Every structure is written in structure tokens, then in C-alpha cells.
Image (cartoon, rainbow, N blue to C red):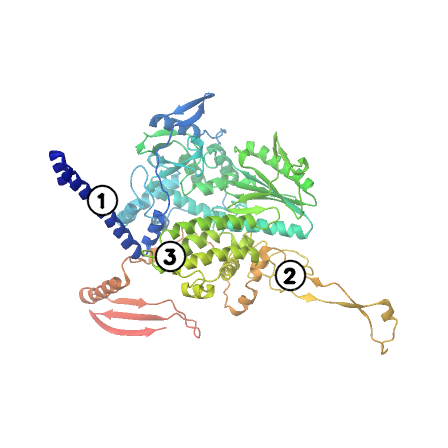
């Protein structure tokens, strides 16, 4: 093309110009054709992680430069245009100084003997390093976890001496308290307002190792003691958002059977981690009588922190910041839970409950009327406001929502009797609120939740649809994998909370799956649905939902006896005996089925007849009496009542493993190969030959597929024994 262009510029005739344009058109056509062939070949041969890479290409990931920012400074509006001015805007808006509190006194401090806090072991350090993903971004020192894992075998003793001394004396080095702050815009927010951005802190991986050790120890202590409240759910083992919502739904439905109305006021702690007062956190640690070395480590961890902001391809110089708990640290969630520990004090009124999921606080009350609920919520909220000043925290008024769960046909939401006044702010009730990803309506019909999940799953389906057409497309297996991983996981979120065989809701999920099946298999619109499900090996939506609920019921069998869900299941549900008291003459237990009983009673005229009278007695039919299901939680546990009889269940004891205890990983070097099955088999054979040929030692090699003999109860294993450079015995034992 360049040749023809020079010729045209030199002679400036019509023929040269025409040849240049033809060469130019052919060049761009070939480039376009090559790109198309490359993309089609990539789609046809995509497998493994490449499948999800193709899905990422369907998203609009535009990296745009930050626009001019507008913020308030000294009671006037300021426009930030340059990079440095934008950094100042973010520092003033996002890094707000936390509440001040007096420093704690450590002169006569005595820690409790109930807390176990031994010296750091090598197993803790190794677990902290090797359980971290090598894909995590490095901090300012650019040392990643991949580097730490590679050099650990060489510097194991130095790592041990370093972290043992730092945690024992309660010190966190200054170089580990530096972070790179990456600026990200919150979705669906105005881009010119600095507060609509969030800062993701990239910390040094060497510092994260110490933080993970502290976090593991505190997590163990929280599950084996009263360090945290039972209703503090997030950031703890075997506790999830679904558990929090399902326990709340159970309380609402149980109160409904008692002819009570439940009202919930959802509040949000402002600025979460950044708003934590370091001195007040240390006072709480003193109140809990935590180990002194831990308290000193927390004090050192929160002091003298620095950050350098990074956006638009530019990086700011290190700047001192006065913030609470840094976001992005492994120890931050558990420290925040300790910070709000005494906010969830035990309530004398059993109809009141304070539920916490990190910064989401739910105040739930139940009574005979909505007006009484509003009075109880107002008093409860005012108590929290008094405690917030004492606990150095603030609640975000803009994110506070009120909802009444009732069975009335109509409720005037603008009526002042149904609102809650906190200070000078009046909160009107809403018909629909979002709590931990679940949309709750006042009737608990979950229609809005299903519609929103279907809409989101449909959007993802349209993205997947772009990867499939009649000529070039992803393989059938790849399309099915994208459907299961990307669509079903989004649509099925919260199924245990609402699924109760509702046909009108099931139809929406089934229609969406039918569309996906036609696109996956490339069949006609009139194709049989059952045939498509068999061909694609995808169960119907109803079967999928029942499986999710049964899996949740099986999961409850493994929960700790103090788990919020375990405290609400039936007293006869294995393996623990709860002290739940209900009128079982009115309600179905978890292992009972719905049976109707008809009772007949004699009339007065019949009772006067002799027993031998041939006259046919008239009997008066009594109304059909039917036991009720207590709640959605009981329905889930009832789904495996027949299944448990046929399963061989084993009783387990929840003995939390101490993080500092010697683990199996320290005794056995477990490695998982990244090679293919064929390549690993060849490498393993060569390794066996080298052991036999070059090493003058005895070797015992055991092969096992972890299968168990039902008759003897023993594991099956193949034993390979070498001695004196030769294979002397090879046998199978069990």
C-alpha cells in the first residue's frame, strides 16, 4: 500500500490514485479478515479459563480518565482539574479524620487468663503465605505472594524469627504501613463527585502475612469464646448473608403465627473502617482483657499510616493519612466486629433483636400493632444513637430504611403513625427494601426479588448470546459452562430464602432456562424442553431449586450449636438438642408431613339414644384441622426428613483447630501438579526409576484413591516398596 501511495504522490495521475485506493481497500479487508478468523478460531477452540475470558470481552470495560471533580472546601465549591488537585480532593473527601478519644492507660492493665495467645509457630507463617493467592496485587514494595512462596524454603528460619518477634512484642513496621490507593468509581454514580469513588488499598504482602496470622487467631477466639455476639454474622466461619436473612425471615414468620407484626429498621454504619477510632478500639480490647501483646500490635498497626493515590496512569507521592482501619487488610473485618461488639448488647425484651452484618445493622421488633412497633423502634434507635457517641461511630441517615411486615390489604405508608422519628429526621416506611442482596417486601411474596434477579440474569444471557451464532460460536460444552457459572449463580441467589414451590415464580426461571437451552444447543424454537434438558444435562429449574434447599438443610447439620440458624431449628433436628419451645399441636415438626384429620362428634339428640339402637346416628362433622408449617427454615429442614433415614450420617464434634497447633502440612509436603495427567504420569514414572537407581535408601510409596470398603470400613491402598536399589515387593493391602 505504501508503494502505491508514493507512486500516486509522485505522478498525481488518476490511474495511480485508483491503484492506491484499491491497494488500501485490499489491505484493510485482509486485516479485517485476519481479525475475524483469529476471533473465530479462538471461539471454536476455547477451553478452560479461555471460556471466561471470552465472556469478559462482552463487557463494556472502558477505562476513562477522571473528569473535573467538584467538592466543598472551606464552605465554597472547588473544581479540581490537575492530578494533584484531584488527589487533594480525594484526601479531603474520602480520608476523613476519625472521632477522637482519649488514649487508654496501660499502667495497671492485666490481661485475662482465658485468652490463649502462645508464640507464633512456623505452621502459622507457612499457612499465611501459601493460602494467599499469587494473583493478589503487590503493594508499594512490589513483592508479591508468588515471590514469598518461592523463597520461603530458603528463608524459613528468618521468616520465623521475624514474625515471632514482631507479634510477641506487638510491633508492626512502618514500611508495612504504606499502601497504594487505587481510585475506583462506584457503579451508577455521578463521576464528578469525589465521595462517589472508593479507595482500594494495595498493602505490602510481607505485612499481610502478619495480619493474616492475627486474623486467624482472632477468628478462632471468636468461635470458641464470647469475644463476639451471636448475631454478628459476617467475617466468621460458616456464616453467610443467606444465614442472616433466613434467620430474620424465621423470626418474622414465627411472630406472625403468634398474631404479631414485625417491623425492621435497617441502619448503616457510616464510613465503616475509616471511621474507627483507634483509641476507642484499644479501650474495647482493654474491656475484653485481651492479651497485652495483641493490644500493642493493634496500636502499632493503626498508627502512622501512609498512602499514595494512583489513577489516570499517575502516582502520587507518599502522604500521611489519619484513618481508622485500612481497607484491604485481612485483619480489618474482625477488628471492626470487635469495635461494634458492645453495640449488640443482650436485650431484656425477647421481641427485640439487633442483627449485624458488618456495617449493616437491623433493628427488628414484634408486637400486636404497627404503632407499638414504631414506638419500640424509636426507643431502640435512640439508645443506639446514645451509644454511637459513646462508641465513637455514626450512622448514615441516607441509608436508613423502615419496613413493616404485615398481612393487611392496604397500608397508608404516608401515615405519621407508621413512621419512626429519630432526632429531627422522620423515616417513612417502604414497601420494598434491599437487605444483603435480597429484596424484601412487606408481604414476603419475593416477587420483586425474583423479577430483579431474572432481569439481571437476562442481561448476562444477552452477553453470552453474542458468543454464539449459526456460523462461528463457542462449543456446546463452553456455552453450558457459561450458563451454569454466570447465569444460574446470579439467578439462584437467595433461593433458600423464598423457594416454596411457587408456580408463578417458577415459570419465570423456567422460561429463561428454555431460552438458554435453545441458544446452547442451537435447536428450533418448537423443540421438546425435556429433550433439550437431557441433551444439555441441565435439570429443570424446580429440581435445581429443591437441590439447593436440600444442600442448605444438609449444611445445617454441620453448623455449630451456637449458630443463629441452629438456634432456630426444631429441638429434634440432629445432631443437637435445642431448647426451642413451640406448641406442636398446632405446628408441624421438621420430620412431620401435612396430614388432615377429620373428627366427628355426636349431637345431643344422638347421645340420648341407647347404644344398641338400630337408628342410624347422625354425626356432626367438625372443621378440618391442619397443622401449620412454622417458617421457611422448617420447610427447608423438612425437605431431607425422608433422606436422612437412608443416609449413613456420622456425628461430628465442632472442635476448632488452633491456628498455632502443628498441622498435617508441616509433616507432609503436599504438592498439586499443574501438568496434564499424561505428563504427570511420565514424570512420576521417571521419579520412581531415579529412586530405585540412584538412592541407597528404602522407599515406601503408597497409592490410594481414598475409597472405603463398606464391609470392613478400611481404606484401600496400593503399597510399593523398594530396597537395595531393586523392587522386592509390590502388593495391595487394605
Label 2 sits on a secondary structure element that is loop
The one nearer the camera, 78 or 352, is 78
What kind of element bears circle 1?
helix
Mark 3 element type = helix
The answer to whether residue 657 is seen in the rendering is: no
**In which quarter of the view is residue 687 placed?**
bottom left
Quarter of the image where the C terminus is located: bottom left
- Which mark's residue is nearer the viewer, 3 or 2? 3
* Residue drawn at point x = 58 percent, y = 53 percent: 567
Q: Position of residue 661 (x, y in %)?
A: 40, 53
The Cα atoms of the two marked residues, 3 and 1, are separated by 32 Å
Residue, disc 1? 28
Q: Which residue is mark 2?
A: 588
Q: Which residue extends farthest front?
A: 14
Circle 2 crowding by C-alpha within 10 Å: few under 14, some 14–19, many from 20 = many
**First in sequence: mark 3 vs mark 1:** 1
Left or right of 284, for residue 480: left
Mark in the foreground, 2 or 1: 1
Disc 3 to disc 2, how far (Cα)?
43 Å
Pinpoint residue 161: horizontal percent, then vertical percent. Answer: 32, 44
Query: Label 2 vs label 1: CA separation?
Result: 73 Å
Q: Which mark is residue 479?
A: 3
Residue 659 lies left or right of residue 678; in this view the side is: right
Q: Mark 3, mark 1: which one is toward the viewer?
A: 1
Which is nearer the N-term, disc 3 or disc 2?
A: 3
As drawn, 334 above or below 39: above
Q: Viewed as shown, does residue 435 lie left or right of 657?
A: right
Amino acid at each position: 500500500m505504501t508503494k502505491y501511495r508514493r507512486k500516486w504522490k509522485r505522478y498525481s495521475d488518476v490511474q495511480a490514485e485508483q491503484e492506491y485506493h484499491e491497494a488500501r481497500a485490499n489491505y484493510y479487508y485482509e486485516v479485517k479478515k485476519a481479525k475475524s478468523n483469529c476471533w473465530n478460531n479462538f471461539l471454536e477452540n476455547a477451553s478452560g479459563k479461555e471460556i471466561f475470558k471470552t465472556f469478559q470481552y462482552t463487557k463494556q470495560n472502558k477505562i476513562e480518565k477522571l473528569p473535573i471533580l467538584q467538592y466543598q472546601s472551606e464552605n465554597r465549591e472547588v473544581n479540581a482539574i490537575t492530578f494533584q488537585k484531584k488527589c487533594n480532593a480525594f484526601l479531603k473527601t474520602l480520608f476523613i479524620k476519625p472521632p477522637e478519644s482519649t488514649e487508654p492507660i496501660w499502667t495497671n492493665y492485666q490481661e485475662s487468663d482465658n485468652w490463649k495467645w502462645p508464640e507464633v509457630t512456623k505452621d502459622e507463617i507457612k499457612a499465611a503465605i501459601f493460602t494467599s493467592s499469587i494473583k493478589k496485587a503487590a503493594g508499594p514494595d512490589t513483592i508479591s505472594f508468588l515471590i514469598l512462596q518461592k523463597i520461603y524454603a530458603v528463608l524459613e528460619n528468618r521468616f520465623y524469627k521475624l514474625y515471632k518477634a514482631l507479634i510477641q512484642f506487638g510491633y508492626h513496621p512502618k514500611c508495612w504501613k504504606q499502601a497504594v490507593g487505587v481510585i475506583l468509581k462506584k457503579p451508577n454514580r455521578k463521576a464528578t463527585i469525589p465521595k462517589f469513588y472508593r479507595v482500594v488499598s494495595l498493602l505490602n504482602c510481607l505485612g499481610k502475612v502478619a495480619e493474616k496470622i492475627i486474623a486467624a487467631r482472632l477468628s478462632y477466639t471468636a468461635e470458641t469464646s464470647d469475644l463476639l455476639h451471636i448475631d454478628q454474622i459476617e467475617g466468621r466461619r460458616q456464616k453467610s448473608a443467606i444465614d442472616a436473612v433466613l434467620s430474620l425471615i424465621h423470626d418474622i414468620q414465627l411472630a406472625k403465627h403468634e398474631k404479631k407484626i414485625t417491623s425492621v429498621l435497617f441502619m448503616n454504619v457510616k464510613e465503616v473502617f475509616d471511621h474507627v477510632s483507634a483509641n476507642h478500639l484499644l479501650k474495647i480490647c482493654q474491656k475484653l482483657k485481651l492479651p497485652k501483646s495483641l493490644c500493642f500490635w493493634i496500636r502499632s498497626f493503626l498508627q502512622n499510616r501512609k498512602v499514595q493515590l494512583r489513577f489516570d496512569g499517575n502516582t502520587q507521592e507518599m502522604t500521611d493519612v489519619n484513618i481508622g482501619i485500612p481497607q484491604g487488610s485481612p485483619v480489618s473485618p474482625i477488628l471492626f466486629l470487635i469495635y461494634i461488639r458492645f453495640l449488640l448488647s443482650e436485650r431484656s425484651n425477647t421481641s427485640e433483636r439487633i442483627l449485624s452484618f458488618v456495617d449493616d445493622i437491623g433493628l427488628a421488633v414484634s408486637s400486636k400493632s404497627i404503632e407499638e412497633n414504631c414506638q419500640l423502634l424509636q426507643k431502640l434507635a435512640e439508645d443506639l444513637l446514645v451509644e454511637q457517641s459513646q462508641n465513637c461511630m455514626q450512622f448514615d441517615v441516607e441509608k436508613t430504611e423502615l419496613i413493616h411486615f404485615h398481612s393487611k390489604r392496604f397500608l397508608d405508608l404516608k401515615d405519621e403513625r407508621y413512621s419512626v422519628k429519630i432526632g429531627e429526621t422522620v423515616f417513612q416506611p417502604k414497601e420494598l427494601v434491599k437487605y444483603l442482596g435480597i429484596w424484601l417486601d412487606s408481604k414476603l411474596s419475593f416477587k420483586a426479588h425474583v423479577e430483579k434477579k431474572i432481569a439481571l440474569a437476562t442481561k448476562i444471557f444477552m452477553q453470552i448470546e453474542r458468543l454464539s451464532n449459526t456460523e462461528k460460536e463457542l462449543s456446546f460444552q463452553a456455552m453450558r459452562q457459561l450458563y451454569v457459572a454466570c447465569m444460574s449463580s446470579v439467578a439462584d441467589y437467595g433461593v433458600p430464602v423464598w423457594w416454596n414451590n411457587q408456580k408463578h415464580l417458577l415459570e419465570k426461571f423456567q422460561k429463561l432456562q428454555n431460552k438458554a437451552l435453545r441458544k446452547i444447543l442451537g435447536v428450533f424454537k418448537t423443540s421438546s424442553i425435556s429433550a433439550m434438558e437431557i441433551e444439555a444435562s441441565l435439570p429443570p429449574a424446580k429440581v435445581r431449586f429443591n437441590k439447593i434447599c436440600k444442600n442448605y438443610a444438609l449444611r445445617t447439620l454441620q453448623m455449630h450449636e451456637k449458630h443463629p440458624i441452629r438456634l432456630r431449628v426444631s429441638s429434634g433436628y440432629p445432631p443437637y438438642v435445642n431448647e426451642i419451645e413451640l406448641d406442636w399441636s398446632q405446628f408441624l415438626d421438621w420430620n412431620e408431613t401435612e396430614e388432615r384429620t377429620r373428627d366427628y362428634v355426636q349431637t345431643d339428640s344422638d347421645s340420648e339414644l341407647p347404644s344398641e339402637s338400630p337408628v342410624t346416628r347422625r354425626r356432626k362433622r367438625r372443621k378440618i384441622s391442619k397443622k401449620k408449617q412454622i417458617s421457611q427454615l422448617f420447610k427447608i429442614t423438612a425437605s431431607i426428613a425422608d433422606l436422612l433415614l437412608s443416609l449413613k450420617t456420622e456425628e461430628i464434634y465442632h472442635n476448632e483447630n488452633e491456628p498455632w497447633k502443628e498441622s498435617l502440612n508441616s509433616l507432609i509436603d503436599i504438592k498439586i501438579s499443574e501438568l496434564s495427567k499424561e505428563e504427570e504420569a511420565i514424570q512420576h514414572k521417571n521419579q520412581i526409576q531415579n529412586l530405585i537407581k540412584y538412592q541407597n535408601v528404602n522407599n515406601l510409596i503408597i497409592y490410594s484413591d481414598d475409597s472405603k470398603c463398606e464391609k470392613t470400613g478400611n481404606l484401600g491402598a496400593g503399597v510399593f516398596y523398594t530396597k537395595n536399589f531393586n523392587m522386592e515387593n509390590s502388593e495391595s493391602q487394605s
